[in-house]
Image (cartoon, helix red, strand yellow):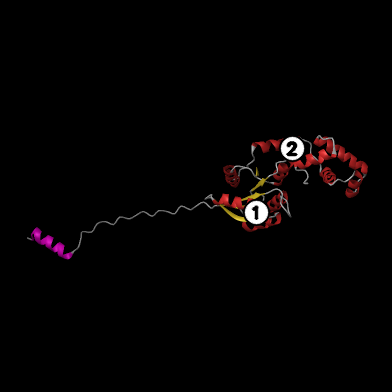
Amino acid sequence: MTSKKTLATKSKKSGKRPKSAAKKTPKVKDTPKEPRIGVLIADDHSVLRQGLVSLIGFEADMVVVGEASNGRQAVDLWKQHRPGVTLLDLRMPELDGVGVIKQIRADDENARIIVLTTFDGDEDIYRAIQAGARGYLLKDVPRDALIDCIRRVHAGETCFPVYLANKLAERVRGETVSEREIDVLKLMAQGKSNKEIGSALFISRGTVKSHVKNIFAKLKVNSRAEAVANAAHRGLIQL
């Protein structure tokens, strides 16, 4: 019979330890990260573009995919990058904001575009929304409100501040200025007489007088200078 001392000695000499069951560490599945929101910035002011790039750079779920300084470039970059959201100024060289919206949405009617501008005329807002903008903000919008709007529009919502929605409601309720009347307004803004306007548009002087009378009534003004100022404020014409 082998003594306990002998067994202990053999175990010590062999250097072997009793085997223990190996613990298996469960594999943790990699959770796929949500893709970041690609943002295209289109504005002809480089300082503003740089500010937006910096602001968006602080957001973990967003990335700037391109910067455009004119309308044509905005359309080209949109086609190249297919951004999740486009921030677009309304007044752009080569192609204005409404033209940009129309061209992009002709390619993809679900394109998500937010107008970011200094212009809050009811006609500006109306034309942008009619073209297909999903949001409309002024450039003095608070940072958090802008970021929130980008996320909301990317999620399929719309983003229009209450006071701009009220302006739009006024525009819809008011009488619509026709395309021909806008043509007359543009020439009035250039200081053209009724005779000169008639020659430019190939209409009679009497027809011009009729258009001017209708313009005064629709804009609720009493002079040509008032009509031009009112139309520019509403966004009907650009001075």
Locate residue 233: give its quadrant.
top right
Locate residue 76: give its quadrant.
bottom right
Mark 1 or mark 2, earlier in chain: 1
Locate residue 193: give its quadrant.
top right
Q: Nearer the viewer, residue 175 or 60?
A: 60
201 inside magenta stretch: no
13 inside magenta stretch: yes
Check disc 1 and report the residue beneath it: 46
Please name the amino acid that badge 1 sits on. Ser
User: Disc 1 vs disc 2: which is toward the camera?
Assistant: 1
Check disc 2 and report the residue beneath it: 171
Q: Secondary structure at mark 1?
A: helix
Packing grade of label 2 (10 A; few <14, some 14-19, many >=20) is: some
Q: Secondary structure at mark 2?
A: helix
Question: Considering only vertical position in the picture, is 12 above or below 97?
Answer: below
Magenta stretch in the rendered image? 2-14
The residue positioned farthest toward the bottom in the image shown: 14
